[in-house]
Amino acid sequence: MSEYENVGVSIRSVSKRYGNTLALDDITLDIEPGEFVSLLGPSGSGKTTLLGALGGFVMPSSGSVWIGDQDVTYMPPHKRNIGVVFQSYALFPHMTVGENVAFPLRARRLPKSTWPERVRQALAMVELEGYQDRGISQLSGGQRQRVALARAMVFEPRLILMDEPLSALDKQLRETMQIELRQLHRKLGATIVYVTHDQREALTMSDRVAILKDGKLVQIGAPETLHNDPKDSFVASFIGDSTLLPVTRVDAHSVKLGKFTLHSARPVSTHPELLLAVQTEKLLIDDERHEAGVNRLNCRVREVVYQGDSLRLFLELEDGTHISLRQPSHHLGQQKIPPIGESLTVVLHPEDTIIVPRAGCQYPAANVA
Amino acid sequence: MKATAVNDRYAPISSIDPSSRHHRREHALMLLLMSPAVLVVFLLLIVPLTWLIGQSFYAEGVLSLEHYRRIFTEGIYWNTFALTFRISIIVTLLALLMGYPIAYAASILPQRWAMLVLALVILPFWTSVLVRAYAWLILLQRSGVINKTLLGTGVIDSPLSLVHNELGTIIATVHILLPFMVLPLYATMQKIPRDLLLAGASLGGSPLHVFLRVFLPLSLSGVLAGMTLVFVLCLGFYITPELMGGGRTVMASMLVSRNIQLYSDWGAASAVSVVLLICVLAIFYVVSRLISLEKILGVK
């Protein structure tokens, strides 16, 4: 199982047209051998179509798809040697767990004597030893998910594709499986392309995240990069929990938000429409111990909402702009919160002062309140 | 139920009585509402069936097993039932052979084309059986379109006897019963998730492998449903064999009509019907052990 022949994937200006709509618009993306890459985007962004082009279920209208040094653009799925985990798991209901996992071995006409051992190993990998003779209907959602995974890797594919494999599970199980998939990826060392619409899931699991919108690749990068240096307001609003506020450029390192001048650690773009992406967890209540260079904003407390692990403060700047702040719900944090209607100073570090250009007009920048 | 039992212990005793009275009243109301349906079933189904069964045990005004003795001992009856079963089996297999590809095509085609295929299957279904039987007569007779074409192109020297025999009966019956094969097959195939086929392909299964290992096994309940329907309907077929068989191909239902029309022997006719009915019920019983009856009848 450990002898994985790692291959990279190269998507070269792939477009896919359905009638008048462009599902994929000139996407170029290189994935390193052994890398875990997530395709993240809202529904209709083309992420599943792109996965389909990798799996062989979707024929690109133009461009090419390479796996390793092989052009697979027009290769039928069964010759690609790719393991696919479907959103619905797609387990064969008329077969036992063992028969499901042995399906790729049978399809490849591998000697029958080798099946039991390989099935056992694959099931052990997903911690389902001894489940060979169970029926699919006897399994829980999480177990089905694991069987689908075992079936997708039993033949040691050079690439594993996953289409929102955790979306049918409840939150707790989903978080456990995220960590398990991450560990499994490390153990196997296989190249994995993972489709999700859940930004937290993408950030938790991936080496790199590719953000798609309207069939276009907006930005690809490590989770930290996307979080700290989003390319535009679309990425900024999609990653994290942020409010976008229009600002005007003052110079290369500062902008004006109403009457406040804010400094940013990163150079400010010269784009005509700039937005400040305020992430709720990056705003802090000022307790006068913060260093001198930080940005300070005076505001009024509109509402305080207790959310269990944290308190969310809804604030209003002097010009009526709304922002919000998240404060851990421990007692020291709660003590600092003034009553509703009182004024409050919040600080934002220049490193956390993220200024992004407004993305193409389709996406309303003010969608996050 | 357990929860109420526990709660009852804490409930005041007086509250139990009115609630059970209320239940009884509801029960009576339900019976009253159901009674028209029950009455219809009783008058139109139970009474005639009982009468039919009773009649089959009467010969020349006395209670006897004479009709059944004749069915089980006389060669003509044995031969007729054997022929009926043979034709039914052949028709069922041919309908499956022709219906499976049609249903398969409809299940994989885009919605609009699938509807067209199904419409083509169902359209003849709305035409009278009599009209379709005569249409086949015209096509298949010695001087019919098929024989004329084959003679004209020199494929054959003398006309084939395609009708007024078992072959003609089978051809027309398959045509008439085909929708009963295609519809349950299509219903089953359509429910097979496409993801399973994509998964089969992605796991390395060639299209043939995926068909044999995934699609075919999952369509088997539809196969069984379609075969049962066609077989059972064929056992009792009357007009088509009467017209297409040319009097030589006598199926069980024709024994019923002959017993009445030629000999006015209602008892013998009833006995044949009862035997046929028992055969059908036995088949349904065996099949229902394998799949649910709702599935065969397309209720679910």
Image: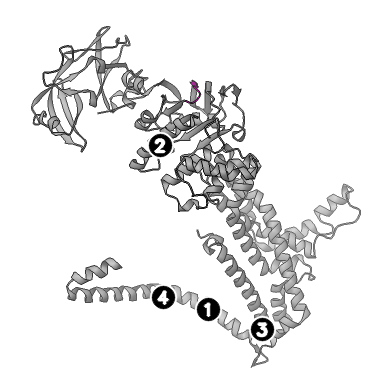
User: Which image quadrant for residue B181?
Assistant: bottom right
Answer whether labels 2 and 4 touch (C-beta < 8 Å): no
Q: Position of residue A236 (x, y in %)?
A: 32, 22
1 or 2: mark nearer the eye: 2
The residue that appears at 31% across and 73% down in the rendered structure is B26
Location of mark 4 (residue): B35
Name the residue nearer the viewer: A128 or B31: A128
Which amino acid is tagged 1? Ile
Q: Which residues are magenta?
A: A29-34
Q: Chain of mark 4?
A: B
Q: Quadrant of residue A63?
A: top right
Taking the spot 17% from the left edge, 19% from the top edge, the residue there is A347
Residue type at the position of mark 2: Glu
* Distance from Cα at disc 3 to Cα at disc 4: 32 Å
Residue found at the very far top of the displayed protein: A251
Name the kind of residue labelled 4 in the image: Ser
Q: Which mark is residue A180?
A: 2
Which residue: 74% across, 71% down?
Answer: B82
For marks 1 and 2, give the CA distance.
Answer: 63 Å
Q: Secondary structure at mark 3?
A: helix
Identify the chain of the residue marked 3, using the numbered disc in the image: B
The quarter of the picture where residue B242 lies is bottom right
A174 lies above or below A211: below
Whole-angstrom CA distance, mark 1 to mark 3, is: 18 Å
- Element assignment for label 4: helix
Number of numbered discs present? 4
Q: CA distance from mark 2 to mark 4?
A: 61 Å
